[in-house]
Structures are given as structure tokens and as C-alpha cells.
Image (cartoon, grey):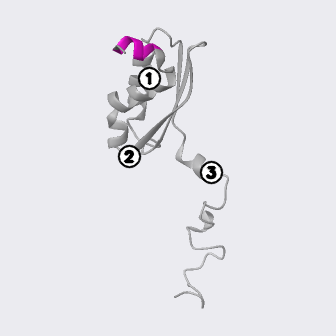
């Protein structure tokens, strides 16, 4: 099978994932992750989500711009959406009183009574 035959037999998702892995290693080098959520060759829509170290990264805008610019040059891709979730989304947003570990964030992580006294149950 030639390279062009392989390219046409691979799904668009596979080719986008392979491209991300080989052309955007900086994502993983900086502790980030990438996932192709949608890659529809019929509509030309691609949705990629960046996570891990990409959340809150000051250069994630540059990374997303580079990914979009390249993928929009592909004949079968018409629209590229790249999502970089806000780190607070992982915790339920800024309105959520407790973290995923059950610690009351409104009291600086000291528990629900807000004292620096560890209490009798503290080891």
C-alpha cells in the first residue's frame, strides 16, 4: 500500500490524531493533552480539545492558532474548533463551594469551620 492509499483509507480522525502527535509534540512536552472529539470528513468539521498543562497556559492561544492554521489547509477540513477548558471547569466552576476532594475552598482549604485548630482527630 502506498502512502497516498494509506492516507485515503485512514479516517480523518486517525490522520488528525497522527498529525497532532508528530507535528505538535510541544503539547505533550509541556504536560498537555490533546483529543480529537470530532472529525467528520463529510461536513469538514474538526473539534479538538486540549487539556492537562494546556489549561491556563499563556501560549495556548498560539498553539490553537497554529493547529487551526494547518488543519484548515487540508482539503477535506472546512471548520476547526479547538477547546481549551478553563481549569475551574474541572472543579464545577467558581460557584462550586467544594473542590473535588471535598475541601471547603471558601475557607482557604481549612475545612468547614474555618479555624487553624486541627482538632482532636488530627494525627
Is residue 52 or residue 7 the one in the foreground? Answer: 7
The answer to which of marks 2 and 3 sits earlier in the sequence is 2
Q: Which residue is mark 1?
A: 15
Residue 79, x across and y down, in percent: 54, 16
Q: Which residue is mark 2?
A: 31
Of the residues tagged 1 and 3, which is closer to the observer?
A: 1
Indicate yes or no whether the magenta region holds residue 6. Answer: yes
Of the residues tagged 2 and 3, which is closer to the observer?
A: 2
The answer to which of marks 1 and 3 sits earlier in the sequence is 1
For the record, the magenta segment spans 3-8
Asked whether the beta carbons under mark 1 and mark 3 sit within 8 Å of each other, the answer is no
Above or below, 104 against 24 in this view is: below
Q: Residues within 10 Å of mark 1 (few under 14, many from 20)?
A: some
Q: Secondary structure at mark 2?
A: loop
Q: Residue furthest bottom?
A: 120
Of the residues tagged 1 and 2, which is closer to the observer?
A: 1
Q: Secondary structure at mark 1?
A: helix
Q: Which residue is mark 3?
A: 94
Indicate yes or no whether the magenta region holds residue 110. Answer: no
Is residue 97 or residue 23 the one in the foreground? Answer: 23
At a point 50% along the width and 20% down the height, the residue shown is 12
Please state if 2 lies on the left or on the right of 38 as rendered.
Answer: left
How much space separates mark 2 and mark 3, taking CA atoms? 24 Å
Residue 89, x across and y down, in percent: 60, 46
Amino acid at each position: 500500500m502506498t502512502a497516498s492509499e494509506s492516507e485515503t483509507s485512514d479516517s480523518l480522525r486517525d490522520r488528525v490524531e497522527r498529525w497532532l502527535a508528530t507535528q505538535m509534540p510541544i503539547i505533550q512536552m509541556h504536560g498537555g493533552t490533546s483529543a480529537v472529539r470530532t472529525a467528520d470528513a463529510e461536513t469538514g468539521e474538526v473539534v479538538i480539545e486540549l487539556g492537562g498543562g494546556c489549561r491556563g497556559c499563556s501560549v495556548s492561544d498560539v498553539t490553537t492558532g497554529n493547529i487551526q492554521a494547518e488543519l484548515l489547509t487540508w482539503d477535506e477540513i472546512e471548520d476547526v474548533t479547538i477547546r481549551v477548558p478553563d481549569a475551574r471547569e474541572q472543579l464545577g466552576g467558581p460557584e462550586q463551594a467544594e473542590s473535588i476532594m471535598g475541601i471547603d475552598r471558601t475557607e482557604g482549604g481549612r475545612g468547614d469551620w474555618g479555624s487553624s485548630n486541627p482538632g482532636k482527630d488530627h494525627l
